[in-house]
Image: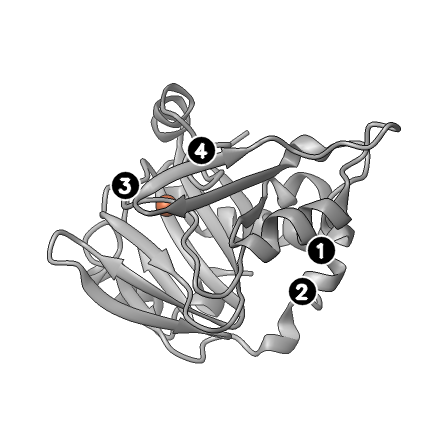
Amino acid sequence: MRLNDLVPDVSSFLDNYWKRNPALFKHQIAPESWPDFRVENLSEWFDKDQPHHIVLYKVDNGELFQYDLPILADGSLDMAEVIDGHYNDGVSITINKLHKRREWARSMATDLLKDFKPFGYVTVGTNVFVTPPNSQAVKAHVDPHQIFVVQLMGTKRWLIGEDRREIVIEAGDVFYLPKGCLHEARTDEVTSIHETLGIYTLQDVEETEREEPKEGEGDAK
Ligand SMILES: [Fe+2]
């Protein structure tokens, strides 16, 4: 995935939004462009022997909870328990570092890095976030790197910036979030699955490693 796939006009994007302003690009990518993400086949998106790539978060009454992973006797993730015991109770599922473990995500990240390397960026990381209906994964926060959000399935309602401007992101939309821009997001009546492409300078990577991970985006390596 190159920058000209994510935005309709690259030079206009770089002049008006990059490192400055959030931007929503509607219907930018055809949903056929990515694998079939559904809650029922989530176990295809992580390796059985590496359950630590999954993180379980939920905001409940304004408080953030992170849940221990249910692990089976053979060391693999108990996916049935993740779905029945957590997801169905409003817990969001984060799948980290897909660019390290799935070819389509790796090529998406390495292709996008080609466009940002000339500007001094060193890493593009890819994570996927699955949020059940009427839920919120994490509280309002800023991330110390540039982010593109690609909505893969469903919709999600975001509150952006200090003025908490509301936007709704639908499948096929691309949303650009500059480094340091306050944001939070929650679902309404449908499940949301989105992918983030985090774009890091070396300094961003070091800064991220010092901070507590948020939404799993903090894992840049
Ligand atoms: Fe974030």
- Mark 3: which amino acid? Val
Task: Report the colour scheme.
Answer: one colour
- Mark 3: give few (<14), some (14-19) or many (20+) Cα within 10 Å: some
Amino acid carrying label 4: it is: Gly
Q: Tell me the residue that label 1 is attached to.
A: 42
Q: CA distance from mark 1 to mark 3?
A: 27 Å
- Residue 51 point in image, percent of width and height: 72, 34
Q: Which residue is mark 3?
A: 142
Of pointers 1 and 3, the one earlier in the residue sequence: 1
List x then y, in percent, for residue 16.
19, 63
Quadrant location of the C terminus? top right
Quick check: is the Cβ at mark 3 less than 8 Å away from ligand 1?
Answer: yes
User: Considering the numbered disc 1 on the image, is that residue within a helix, a strand or a loop?
Assistant: helix
Give the quadrant of residue 34: bottom right
In the depicted view, which residue is nearer to us: 171 or 99? 171
Q: Secondary structure at mark 3?
A: loop
Image-based side of 84 in relation to 114, left or right = right
Task: For the residues labelled 1 and 2, say whether their Cβ atoms are less than 8 Å apart.
Answer: yes
Q: CA distance from mark 2 to mark 3?
A: 27 Å
* Dot 1 alpha-carbon crowd within 10 angstroms: few under 14, some 14 to 19, many 20 or more: some
Res 127 label? none
- Give the residue at mark 4: 218
Label 2 beta carbon within 8 A of ligand 1? no
